[in-house]
């Protein structure tokens, strides 16, 4: 069955996506987008100054590194007049925010971009005069508007594939300091970022859209997360455009924040609410510690779960947590590998415990430790040997360890990826191809929302990135949460729902199609941590034989005693 699904996936992909591609080409023709072959894409940059925020510097740097793109023109327009009319309360909160949460590199630190555009012709224009009749000689493919807030009608016809500009929720790019602020103050679960194209015929299309977790309490961190992630959007869209010579994703851009624009905004009330929540969270951290626990259940006939009730929880000592359980059956016995993290060191290592059908279990024993943090001990077998692929993101690698003596002797076998900001790499052998699902983030961003795919002929590579990476950008269902599994001929992928909190719930997604050109999955169930009172999240789901394991997140009192006992919820 697995062989049939994989081999037929190419045919399904053609049937499903060829008509869409044809329609996309027709739409481009209707929009006046000429489809032609050329060696390089010619990009003009519309800017108001040679000094720009650091995230825009990073964006231009990524574009310049593309060998199929050339900057052909700098279009300089007088900067808009901005006055700091921010309320005093907001300025005070922003100052405190920078002091408390400003550990990540500031996306709005100013940098000189002239070195990246050295030798590119400069033209200063007055857009109000619609002075664009001489731009045709530059043969421009894309105008990249990094100023924002300009009337695209003033640039009509300048670029074959449109005027590209960023949009962050309901915040205008020309006022960068407020990006991400509204979402924090309104306690919105998601912060939306887009790259839009204003086409020559006036249509607006969305090239890239991403939904990241709203970072609570801190507009500064939420803003920087959105900016640093978005620095890669333009280079991704240009790569897709160069490959297809069409606009990559013809969709009418619809604002996610129309309601927010209409209902107004009370700054004083919002600041008071967020400040109270921040103070409450601070007091909560003084009284309690965030602790993950592991739970298990034996089932004679595993089915697609729609609830996590009925699991037996295993409480760790109060000085540590247990998370990321991965089970394996060996000679009729069940072993569960976990991340074990003592709070004193805040560095995880891999341990193993045995669980039994009678409900008993053994205390975990450490089996793998490195100088850097380890978690998510993904297990797979190949050619008769057992391997582990733990998360080693702190080392900026994806590593594989071979088991030389089960269960406690593991030795480094291979490094699959290097110099990557990654999390929770998960392998799946589908048909005759190996796939790696892994979340990868830009520098300075969280790792909850951008799922990348790689494929290879065997689990040690070489690994080839999917042409549409990231294949998903949604904090609600991107980050891997355990082994993919087959049930009644369907392939399912567990994923983490990381809103409103990291690891809030589990999302089960049915994989509709996967090949080197496409990836499509549909959410079919969301599993909440309902097997134990007081749990706030769950972010791992795995099976082996009759055993199903999950984990859960709770806040445990720092003071008093915590019993390490078995609990069975009916």
Image (tube, rainbow, N blue to C red):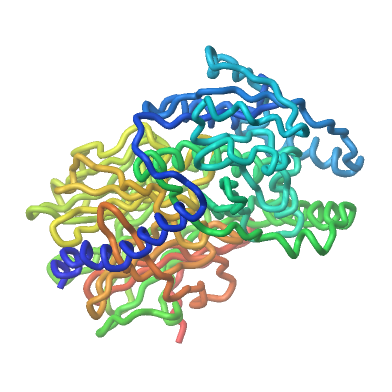
Q: Nearer the viewer, residue 150 or 478?
A: 150
Query: Quadrant of residue 483 in the image?
Result: bottom left
Name the residue furthest left: 383
Residue visible at 24% across and 80% down? 488
Name the residue furthest top: 119
Residue visible at 34% across and 79% down? 304
Q: Is residue 310 left or right of residue 39?
A: right
Residue visible at 54% across and 13% down? 118
Question: How far from the left and from the top, in percent, is residue 443?
Answer: 50, 35
Question: How far from the left and from the top, in percent, is residue 405?
Answer: 14, 49
Picture quarter with the N terminus: bottom left
Name the residue furthest bottom: 570
Question: How far from the left and from the top, in percent, is residue 261?
Answer: 78, 59
Q: Is residue 390 above or below residue 117?
A: below
Q: Is residue 129 left or right of residue 232?
A: right
Q: Nearer the viewer, residue 178 or 161?
A: 161
Q: Nearer the viewer, residue 66 or 104?
A: 66
Q: Is residue 208 visible?
A: no
Question: How far from the left and from the top, in percent, is residue 291?
Answer: 53, 58
Q: Nearer the viewer, residue 369 or 328?
A: 328
């Amino acid at each position: 069955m697995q062989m049939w699904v994989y081999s037929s996936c190419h045919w399904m992909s053609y049937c499903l996506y060829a008509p869409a591609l044809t329609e996309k080409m027709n739409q481009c023709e209707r929009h006046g987008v000429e489809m032609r072959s050329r060696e390089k894409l010619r990009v003009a940059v519309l800017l108001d100054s040679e000094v720009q925020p650091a995230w825009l510097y990073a964006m231009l740097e990524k574009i310049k590194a593309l060998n199929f793109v050339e900057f052909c023109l700098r279009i300089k327009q007088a900067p808009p007049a901005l006055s700091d009319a921010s309320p005093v309360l907001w300025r005070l909160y922003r100052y405190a925010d920078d002091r408390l949460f400003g550990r990540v590199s500031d996306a709005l630190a100013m940098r000189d971009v002239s070195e990246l555009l050295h030798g590119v012709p400069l033209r200063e224009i007055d857009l109000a005069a619609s002075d664009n009749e001489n731009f045709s000689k530059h043969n421009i493919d894309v105008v990249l508007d990094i100023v924002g807030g300009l009337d695209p009608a003033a640039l009509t016809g300048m670029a074959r594939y449109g005027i590209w500009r960023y949009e962050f929720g309901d915040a205008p790019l020309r006022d960068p300091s407020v990006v991400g602020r509204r979402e924090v103050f309104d306690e919105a679960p998601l912060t939306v970022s887009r790259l839009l194209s204003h086409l020559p015929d006036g249509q607006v299309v969305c090239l890239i859209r991403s939904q990241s977790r709203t970072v609570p309490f801190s507009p500064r961190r939420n803003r920087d997360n959105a900016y640093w992630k978005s620095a890669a959007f333009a280079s991704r869209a240009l790569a897709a455009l160069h490959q297809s010579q069409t606009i990559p994703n013809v969709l009418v851009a619809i604002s996610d924040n129309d309601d927010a624009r209409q209902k107004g905004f009370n700054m004083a009330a919002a600041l008071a609410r967020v400040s109270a929540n921040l103070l409450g969270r601070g007091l909560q951290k003084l009284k309690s510690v965030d602790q993950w626990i592991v739970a298990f259940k034996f089932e004679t006939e595993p089915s697609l779960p729609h609830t996590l009730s009925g699991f037996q929880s295993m409480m760790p000592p109060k000085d540590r947590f247990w998370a990321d359980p991965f089970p394996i059956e060996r000679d009729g016995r069940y072993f569960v590998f976990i991340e074990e993290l003592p709070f004193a060191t805040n560095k995880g290592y891999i341990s193993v415990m045995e669980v039994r059908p009678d409900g008993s279990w053994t205390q975990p024993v450490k089996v793998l430790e490195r100088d850097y943090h380890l978690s998510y001990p993904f297990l797979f077998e190949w050619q008769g040997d057992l391997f582990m692929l733990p998360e080693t993101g702190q080392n900026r690698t994806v590593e594989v360890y071979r088991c030389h003596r089960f269960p406690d002797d593991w030795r480094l076998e291979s490094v699959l990826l290097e110099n990557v900001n990654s999390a929770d790499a998960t392998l799946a052998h589908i048909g005759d191809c190996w796939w790696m699902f892994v979340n990868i983030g830009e520098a300075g961003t969280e790792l909850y929302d951008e799922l990348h795919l790689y494929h290879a002929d065997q689990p040690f590579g070489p690994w080839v990135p999917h042409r549409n990476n990231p294949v998903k950008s949604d904090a609600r269902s991107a980050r891997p949460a355990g082994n993919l599994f087959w049930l009644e001929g369907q392939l399912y992928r567990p994923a983490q729902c990381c809103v409103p909190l990291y690891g809030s719930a589990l999302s089960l997604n049915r994989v509709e199609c996967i090949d080197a050109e496409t990836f499509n999955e549909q959410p079919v169930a969301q599993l909440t941590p309902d097997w134990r009172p007081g749990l706030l999240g769950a972010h791992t789901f795995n099976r082996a034989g009759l055993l199903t394991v999950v984990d859960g997140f709770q806040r445990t009192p720092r003071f008093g005693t915590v019993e390490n006992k078995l609990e069975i919820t009916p």
